Amino acid sequence: MIKKIALGVLLFALPFLANAQDLKLGYINSQEVMMLMPEINDIEKQMADFNAQNTKYMQDMEAEIQTKMAKYESERENLSEAIRKVQEEDLQELYRRYQNAQQTLYAEMQTKQQKLLQPVQDKLKNAIDAVGKKNNFYFIFDLAQGGIVYKSDKATDVTALVKKELGII
């Protein structure tokens, strides 16, 4: 929401800034650039290995649940009520462990992916900042994120002016 408001304010101010001869705006598709960075191949391999290991673990748990469920189903008619109840509780606990493992592994995957991507994202951000400074851009917009990824020190924050215009300060 704040990005949309900032973008709206910027677009509102553009006609007034257009008279400035050195005003330069740029845009980038950060996703496209990031996917071309050599570090991404290694990250994808690490994530594939991580996911393969976890998939195997989850498949083993599924097989255990299916085996125990099949055994229970085949013996259920011959079991006493007490034993049936204990086995049903065991199956429910096994299924709860399976669901917890699924959630935990998903969270671990997200954390690992973010940890691996952070240095690449930082490298890309530094490159964008360097391009912005070297080429005197006022703003660089990111098509992938839908916001501003670089703002020059020369850019003017017009928030106070807009508030004054609206009579809210």
Image (cartoon, rainbow, N blue to C red):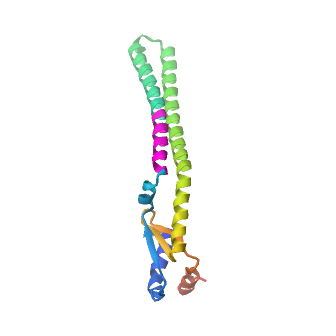
**Horizontal and vertical percent position of residue 31:** 43, 58
Name the residue at the top extreme: 78
**Which residues are drawn in magenta?**
39-53
**Horizontal and vertical percent position of residue 122:** 56, 58
74 to the left or right of 132? left
Tell which of 163 and 123 is nearer to you.
Answer: 123
**Horizontal and vertical percent position of residue 57:** 48, 30
Please name the residue shown 52% across and 55% down the image: 120
Please name the residue shown 54% across and 73% down the image: 133
Is residue 50 within the magenta segment? yes
Main SS type for the magenta part? helix
Tell which of 99 and 129 is nearer to you.
Answer: 129
Tell which of 159 and 75 is nearer to you.
Answer: 159
Is residue 97 within the magenta segment? no
Q: Is 48 rendered above or below residue 89?
A: below
Name the residue at the right extreme: 169
Q: Is 1 rendered above or below residue 114?
A: below
Residue 164 occupies which quadrant of the picture? bottom right
